[in-house]
Amino acid sequence: METPSALSPSTLHGLAEAIVSVPYQLGYYPKASLIAICMQRDPGRAESKPTQRGQVALTARVDLGPPEEHWEVLAAIEPALARVDTGLVVLIAFEEGAGHSSDATVLLTKAGALADSHGARVMAAARVRGRRWRHVTSAASLEGWQDLPADEDVQVIADYVMAGRAPAPDRRSVDDLLRPICEELARAVARRYAGTAASDRTAQIGAEGVLWRAARMVATVIGENGRAEPPDWDAEDLLCSIDALDDLGFRDALLHALSPSSTAADDLVDKGMQRIVSAAMASPVEVDSAACVRMAQAAAYVPEDRSAPWLSLVGYLCWQAGEGALANVVITAARAADPDYSLARLVDMALCAAIAPPRPV
């Protein structure tokens, strides 16, 4: 299940605008997917008074399945529907691309009943095929298929565009971020990785030098001093980051600088590591959606047997930034590289349980 978080509050005027906004929330255009837009109830309105207003807390996606697999689909979407802050739900089935009967009416009805069993009210449910949609619930279902509005006619889309969010064509495009796009850098990293041991780098530039270059590499990738592309990245700096992230103290100091989620965490960070990271990069640094993409691209050059720390770091940052689709991709890769790596396991559990990330203070 993919669980992107919403951006700062924006207003959606009706179900059609909610449908158009989904690709921007997910990060790509979904196919054969069940979407649950989970909202908090409007706190300013009495519980006894029905309302069509609420703030989006979570957008969750699972693959559609044939009728005999509906229980699996419902089990995957249930954590989002069962969240304590989910009071209102919009259910959307993107039917295009399904390899079976594309009428998701029955599945939407079952998902609505599941939401109701957890105390969440379904505001609306809809089926989508390409640029057309229709209601499943209410008398409006008699209206039949309708055209979706153009993206440029929906104000919330402008908010996403201004925030640097643009959906990829499909899920595969998100997966492709973990494939190297600069062959020269990939060759340089592979050559130096095979020819120089971590102990040799430490002997040449010192342990603190390795850590400093590692932090600078991350700062370069996230664009602290201007956006740099893979051809501009230094292979030796990338290797230093691979070595440094094996040290949990450095990893946690770096994570704290990039995602300061609580003041209490500051007391747990190694002060020596924190000093090195602070000297190498501005702290704290805001990691936005574009920076998450570049961090994932950098992870594509890390040898698979050493990739779990890099991928886990990226996965946490993506989760924190609301890039749920990318977070799922990189955490899956991290767990494939090392099933027991603790940070990957924790982020994976949070994504599967639809837990919202901690927010910086």
Image (cartoon, helix red, strand yellow):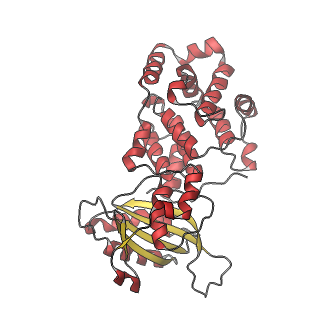
The residue shown at (63%, 21%) is 210
What percent of the width, then of the height, locates residue 287?
Answer: 62, 43
- Above/below status of 24 relative to 105: above
- Say left or right for 6 vs 336: right
What percent of the width, then of the height, locates residue 156?
Answer: 56, 62
Numbered-mark total: 0
- Above/below status of 48 relative to 5: below
- Say left or right for 101 vs 361: left
Closest to the observer, 5 or 348: 5
Residue lying at the far left in this picture: please name it.
Answer: 100
What percent of the width, then of the height, locates residue 109?
Answer: 37, 77
The residue shown at (66%, 32%) is 225
Quarter holding residue 77: bottom left
- Above/below status of 320 relative to 80: above
Q: Is residue 339 at least partly visible in the picture?
A: no
Closest to the observer, 203 or 359: 359
Q: Is residue 122 at least partly visible in the picture?
A: yes
The residue shown at (35%, 64%) is 72
What percent of the width, then of the height, locates residue 115?
Answer: 46, 75
Quarter holding residue 63: bottom left
Q: The N terminus appears in which quarter of the rendering?
A: bottom left
